[in-house]
Amino acid sequence: MKHELSQEIVVAMDPKSIYSEAYRVLRTNLQFTGLDKPLKAILVTSSNPQEGKTTVAANLAVTMSQVGNKVLLVDADMRKPRLQKVFMLENYKGLSTMIASDQDIESVVVHTEIPNLDILTSGPVPPNPAEILSSKKMRLFIEKCKEIYDTVLFDTPPVNSVADASILSTMVDGTIIVTAANQTEREAVKAAKEQLEKVNARILGVILNKVKESRGGYYYYYYYYGEDNQKVRKKKRHAYS
């Protein structure tokens, strides 16, 4: 079945743009980060709402699929899910119904028109998202996905809002924090990082999102990567008008 895409999926809608190049840089950095320990399951979160984590997760998933990786993008934000809107999908079934009713993965994932990319929406909002994410069934689901897919990306609620991201971060291979420039306070990012460290999450780094370049007038992304806060790398992309 063919599905439309929203303009947020810039790597598919405008692959030659500076935005798309930024996501390709992110993909490359993650590949190098996972040389010693493969990153098959990656969590994308933020410290606060509306920092762009869902957009980042969606574009990163598409970018990874474009190099031949079989990718599953999971909406694990069962409180305020957005992936169904980004990919213009229905959400009457998904992660919540699969865990609750023991459905198999194939019966709930959506095969998109983007080669190698499958989507698992959140499903109906359950009364107990944290319990679902912390369940044994959830852990088994992640392990099964890692057998089927090259990469599994999880979009989760903000760390400082609820416990969901912290819970899920203990089950994946790495966590990325998205933060918005001129919007998120330093203390909020620090609190999110400290919370993830308390549960021994593997923090891959921080994406500084929504940074406006003064001359060109567009938004670009500035990535900070450091395995366990060591050997920090910096990548920047500019375009001049």
Image (tube, helix red, strand yellow):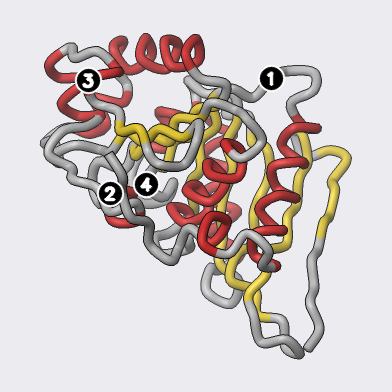
Badge 3 marks a residue whose secondary structure is: helix
Which mark, residue 157?
4
Badge 2 marks a residue whose secondary structure is: helix
Q: Amino acid at mark 1?
A: Pro
Q: Amino acid at mark 4?
A: Pro
Which residue occupies the extreme front position in the image? Answer: 1
Q: CA distance from mark 3 to mark 1?
A: 27 Å
Residue 193 in view of the camera? no
Q: Amino acid at mark 3?
A: Ser
Which residue occupies the extreme right position in the image? Answer: 231
| Residue that mark 2 sits on | 84
Residue 72 position by quadrant: top left
Q: Residue sitting at 27 percent across and 39 percent down?
A: 1
| Residue that mark 1 sits on | 38
Q: Amino acid at mark 2?
A: Gln
Quarter containing the C terminus: bottom right
Q: Is residue 200 above or below residue 157?
A: above
Q: Is residue 181 above or below residue 76?
A: below
* 198 or 180, nearer to the observer: 180
Image coordinates of residue 214 in percent, x first then y, are 72, 88
* 171 or 72, nearer to the observer: 72
Image coordinates of residue 22 in percent, x first then y, are 70, 58
Which mark, residue 107?
3
Using a 10 Å C-alpha cutoff, classify the residue at mark 4 as few (fewer than 14 neighbours), some (14 to 19) or many (20 or more): many
Image coordinates of residue 159 in percent, x first then y, are 44, 46
In primary-sequence order, the first of circles 2 and 4 is 2
Q: Nearer the viewer, mark 3 or mark 1?
A: 3
Q: Nearer the viewer, mark 1 or mark 4?
A: 1
Q: Nearer the viewer, mark 3 or mark 4?
A: 3
Label tally: 4
Q: CA distance from mark 3 to mark 4?
A: 25 Å
Q: Nearer the viewer, mark 3 or mark 2?
A: 3
